[in-house]
Image (cartoon, grey):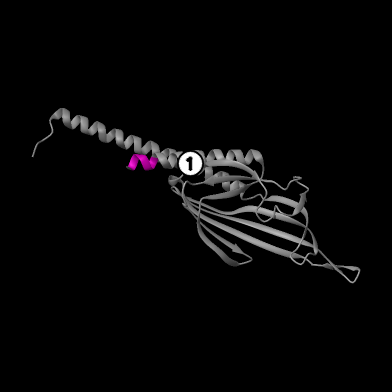
């Protein structure tokens, strides 16, 4: 067994000290970035993205349908455990309308009454499996408003909301979707979107997610 010389021990101790300092810096950075992201999302959870809309289209029975309603989108749960993320997004649609029935030369309007559609998305992912350039601010119509219909909104003429979009090069995101308390989707996804209350908030959210992702990637590299 070959023993280390005095200089060898000094060099080894310096290497261990440097490793500890580097590890401590990375852990501190992760804690800082993760805490800032968690605080930001906690603040955003107090708000909803809102669209007050009117919509019309011809249904499968070739009858004219018109609706007016309000759609609310918000983050209902966000957990960050080191680099593991659990996020839950709820989209609530409250609407009513009329269905136009035609027959024998007459037109009859049937009122639908007050209707409700609730959709809950839950996502599980690891920030350490992302890249910082896969996170973006996005402006888009919610999936719950069918873009093949004719609709307008008070808040935004084209019914766009702001989101933080996260994408992965492979199906790294576990997604479940529950419609009106019935789970009808359980899959691996390549992207997710989190609703944001404004463009400025979406830009800030994308920046904070990117910073937390970089910290997680640095931690993964340090442990390799």
What span is in magenta?
A: 219-223
46 part of magenta stretch = no
Relative to 93, does residue 17 appear above or below in the rendering? Answer: above
In the rendered view, does 157 fall on the left or right side of 208? right
Considering depth in this image, is 51 or 32 the residue closer to the camera?
Answer: 51
222 part of magenta stretch = yes
Q: Position of residue 36 (x, y in %)?
A: 52, 41
Number of marks present in the image shown: 1
Q: Quadrant of residue 99?
A: bottom right
Q: Position of residue 57 (x, y in %)?
A: 77, 58
Q: Mark 1 points at which residue?
A: 212
Considering depth in this image, is 96 or 148 the residue closer to the camera?
Answer: 148
Quadrant holding the N terminus:
top left
Please name the residue shown 57% across and 66% down the image: 183
Considering depth in this image, is 84 or 20 the residue closer to the camera?
Answer: 84
Relative to 169, does residue 22 appear above or below in the rendering? Answer: above
């Amino acid at each position: 067994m070959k023993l280390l010389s005095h200089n060898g021990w000094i060099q080894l101790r310096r290497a261990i000290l440097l490793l500890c300092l580097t590890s401590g810096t990375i852990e501190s950075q992760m804690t800082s970035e993760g805490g800032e992201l968690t605080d930001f999302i906690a603040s955003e959870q107090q708000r909803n993205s809102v669209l007050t809309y009117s919509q019309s289209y011809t249904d499968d029975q070739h009858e004219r349908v018109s609706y007016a309603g309000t759609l609310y989108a918000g983050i209902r749960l966000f957990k960050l455990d080191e680099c593991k993320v659990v996020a839950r997004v709820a989209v609530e649609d409250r609407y009513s309308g009329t269905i136009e029935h035609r027959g024998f030369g007459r037109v009859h309007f049937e009122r639908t009454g007050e209707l409700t559609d609730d959709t809950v998305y839950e996502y599980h992912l690891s920030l350490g499996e992302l890249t910082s350039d896969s996170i973006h601010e996005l402006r888009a119509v919610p999936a719950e408003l069918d873009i093949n219909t004719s609709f307008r909104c008070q808040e935004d003429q084209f019914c766009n909301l702001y989101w933080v979009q996260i994408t992965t090069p492979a199906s790294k995101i576990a997604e479940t979707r529950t419609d009106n308390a019935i789970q009808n989707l359980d899959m691996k996804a390549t992207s997710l979107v989190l609703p944001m209350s404004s463009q400025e908030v979406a830009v800030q959210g994308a920046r904070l997610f990117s910073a937390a992702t970089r910290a997680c990637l640095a931690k993964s590299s340090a442990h390799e």
